[in-house]
Amino acid sequence: MHIRSIVAPLLKWFAANARDLPWRRTRDPYAIWVSEIMLQQTQVKTVIPYWQRWMERLPDIASLAAADEDMVIKLWEGLGYYLRARNLQQAARRIRDELGGRFPRDLAGALALPGVGRYTGGAICSIAYNQPEPLVDGNVARVLTRLLGIEESLKARPVADRLWSVADELVNHAVTLQKPRQRNASAFNQAMMELGALVCTPRSPLCGDCPLKGRCIARKQNKVQTIPALAKRAAATNRRFIGFLIAWRGKVFVQRRPSGEVNAGFWEFPNWEVDAAATADQLAKRELRLGQAELEPLCTINHSITRYRNRLEIFVIEPGCKPRLAKIKGKWITLAKLGELPFTAAHRKAANQFAD
């Protein structure tokens, strides 16, 4: 099989089976850029409402560049991997200040922006501008390794180089088949991703529904379940945190995560990572100097961030007089304001439970 033979049937399949996703109804590079950044590490069904809210509030590069940082990360709240949102705004400001407010029309220009890598740049240039730029994400890599019967690890540099080379050959061939008013570079790259998302799935792929089933080496050799070869996941690390929701006269104390740290810019309640033997009473005395205050358990939240399995235990403190929290930086806010600020997911759950 010559790999180019997959292009025509895949384009035909995509024309009949493509999902009606909101960012597919536009050629605006800004809208497509936002969708591609949101879709990194995040499922389509999760992204759709976030993308729609984002585009309502920040419909173009100028509005994103001028937006208040709290509003930007509030719109991102719950999507995770928050550096993506900060990079989006940083890139928008660079486009405004250095590029006349227009998104770059070439791959090199896109790659110069914060947060735009080889895949994202190729996706924007091909989908928005119909340029024959290749792209390889997890879905495309899975489709290609199965089609070609590649059993080596995706982490191997020769494998990655080969996949990008094949993707480049295919998208350029798609353009040679293009008729007037067709956008085959855009359609082909989206078709590859769509096939991986809907049919050539990681587990239990729907090989019987695949338009390329007769061309797939992994299927012919009964190796669909072992291709692609995936690296072993790193062992999970358990971490324990104790936090305090300090309430006084209708206000609560919050602090902002500093720049350079995970979830920088988001708000949270004072908290510390502790060992298994630590107690909330001991921590409150040492860090908050609230030795006489009574602690009331509010909730325990288990959540995961990459390879970490975190346990956050939140306690409510309602002292009789306004505490002096000299050791930690933060501010007092009303309960109403609590809902307006962007919080990390675990602390948002604690805030909601307290408000209820």
Image (cartoon, helix red, strand yellow):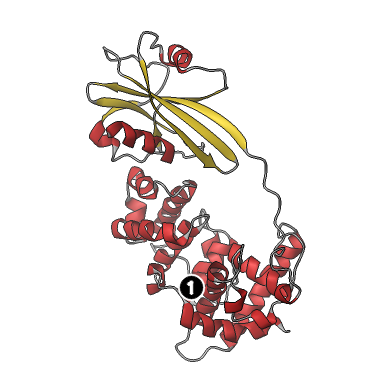
Q: Point out residue 58 in the picture as x, y percentages from the top left corner.
A: 32, 57
Q: Point out residue 98 in the picture as x, y percentages from the top left corner.
A: 44, 58
Residue 268 shown left or right of residue 224 in the figure: left
- Residue sticking out furthest to the bottom: 179
- Residue found 67% across the figure and 47% down from its top: 233
From the image, which quarter does the C terminus lie in?
A: top left
Residue 333 shown left or right of residue 143 in the figure: left
Q: Quadrant of residue 355?
A: top left
Q: Quadrant of residue 174?
A: bottom right
Residue 269 shown left or right of residue 188 in the figure: left
Say what amino acid the circle numbered 1 marks. Ile
Residue 26 appears in the figure: no
Mark 1 crowdedness (10 Å alpha carbons): few <14, some 14-19, many ≥20: many
From the image, which quarter does the N terminus lie in?
A: bottom right
Secondary structure at badge 1 equals helix
- Residue found 53% across the figure and 28% down from its top: 240
- Residue found 44% across the figure and 33% down from its top: 257
Q: Point out residue 272 in the picture as x, y percentages from the top left corner.
A: 49, 24
Q: How many marks?
A: 1
Q: Is residue 132 above or below residue 243?
A: below
* Residue bearing mark 1: 127
- Residue sticking out furthest to the top: 292
Foreground pick, 335 / 186 = 335
Foreground pick, 93 / 336 = 336
Q: Point out residue 300 in the picture as x, y percentages from the top left corner.
A: 44, 31
Q: Is residue 53 above or below residue 271?
A: below
Residue 216 appears in the figure: yes
Q: Is residue 259 above or below residue 164?
A: above
Q: Quadrant of residue 331?
A: top left
